Image (cartoon, grey):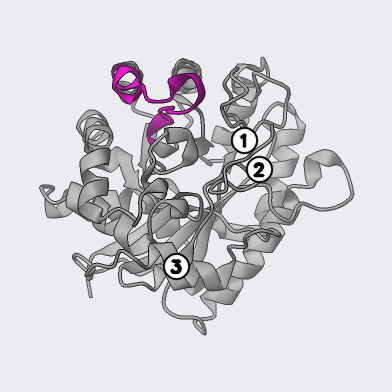
Amino acid sequence: MTNADPLLGPDRQIVVREDWLCLTDEPVLEPGLPIVDPHHHLWQRAHSSYLLPELLADTGSGHDIRATVFVQCGEMYRAAGPAEERSLGETEFVTGIAATSASGRHGPTRACAGIIGMVDLTLGDKVDTLLEAHRTIAGARFCGIRNRTAWHPSPEVTTNLVLPPPGPLEHPAFHDGARRLARHGLPLDVWCYHTQLPHVVALARAVPELTVVVDHVGGPLGIGPFAGRQAEVFPEWKQRMLDLAELPNVVVKLGGLTMYVGGFDFHRHPKPPSSAELAKTWQPYIETCIEAFGADRCMFESNFPVDKGMCSYSVLWNALKRLASGASAAEKTALFSGTASRVYCLDRLPEALSVDLSIK
């Protein structure tokens, strides 16, 4: 697909413009609230890179980010070897960055304290061997798997599949792989569009022993055939999220709403949105999820640098804090650090890698 939009990169993500982001600056709200950011990426690309220095510049912008969780994005795969083993290169790459951060020489944030990797769950017996290989590389930091699952038949909707459409969620072997993952005590992150949520419901019902983490509030679409139709999409999305909330093994990440696929256009405004503007826009989605799942099954996320095309890291977390302003202290702890720490077992890291989440 030819892209003539100067605000979209070749990866169909919104271009990050640091000078534009600086046009909105505001004081950090609740600077002493400990945060675990459970969803970000790292990559080196010709048009934009987001590596440890860029991550730490964002996490060091005023909020108390104690730790982060890296989520697979297809970066630094091995150039050779069996296809199913090439994703081990990403885990090797991120493990090195995590070790660099854990040295303490780059500040208090424990970047990549958790690592979510890629193992194709349709591979049958190979799944177990591959999971062990990732764990051998990353040790206790290895905390989950995500496959590339987001797909919609419209060519205007961004896709991230490796398998042919409709992708692994509908593959006959996927549930078997999910059961294997559960036996290893690891959760499964799922990035899908709201149109695919019935498949996630089916998965969570079929494998109740597996913790399923639904990324980015379930992916309500706002581009292609859904452009300008957020009001129509919302009730359909909401009902599917309510269906998921009935299943106790499902957890949801609250964020990702400033991705290109969501259809919001803050990046086209003369200046970036304030946290109050973001909170007003996100409120129906975030409140629906918290009311349905409860704070102990929700975790706020940044999804950086993907969401950075529309807002800065500091403003994003201010918006999330505004949305949680009516929550109790226990609920805030769950939303900002507790749920993520529990689901990704950061509270069980060895002492040398431990993350301090106590109020300072």
Mark 3 vs mark 1: give the one in front: 3
Task: Tell me, yes or no, whether the two marked residues, 1 and 2, touch with CB atoms within 8 Å.
Answer: yes
**Dot 1: what SS?**
loop
Identify the residue shown where x is 37% and y is 34%: 217
Q: Is residue 102 visible?
A: yes
Identify the residue shown where x is 50% and y is 74%: 352
Q: Quadrant of residue 47?
A: bottom right
Identify the residue shown where x is 62% and y is 62%: 49
Closer to the camera, 181 or 332? Answer: 332
Mark 3 and mark 1 lie on one chain; the one further toward the N terminus is 3
Question: What x and y, as percent, mark residue 164?
Answer: 73, 22
The stretch of residues the image draws in magenta is 217-235
What is the quadrant of the C terminus in the image? bottom left
Mark 2 crowd level (few <14, some 14–19, many ≥20, 10 Å Cα): many
Closer to the camera, 155 or 290? Answer: 155
Mark 1 and mark 2 lie on one chain; the one further toward the N terminus is 2
Mark 3 and mark 2 lie on one chain; the one further toward the N terminus is 3
Question: What x and y, as percent, mark residue 44?
Answer: 67, 61
Residue type at numbered disc 3:
Asp
In reply to whether residue 268 is colored magenta, the answer given is no
The tag on residue 19 is: 3
Question: What x and y, as percent, mark residue 153?
Answer: 60, 17
C-alpha separation, residue under disc 3 versus residue under disc 1: 34 Å
- The residue tagged 2 is 118
Q: Quadrant of residue 121?
A: top right
What is the quadrant of the N terminus in the image? top right
Mark 1 crowd level (few <14, some 14–19, many ≥20, 10 Å Cα): many
C-alpha separation, residue under disc 3 versus residue under disc 2: 34 Å
Say left or right for 245 vs 174. left
Identify the residue shown where x is 50% and y is 50%: 306
The tag on residue 147 is: 1
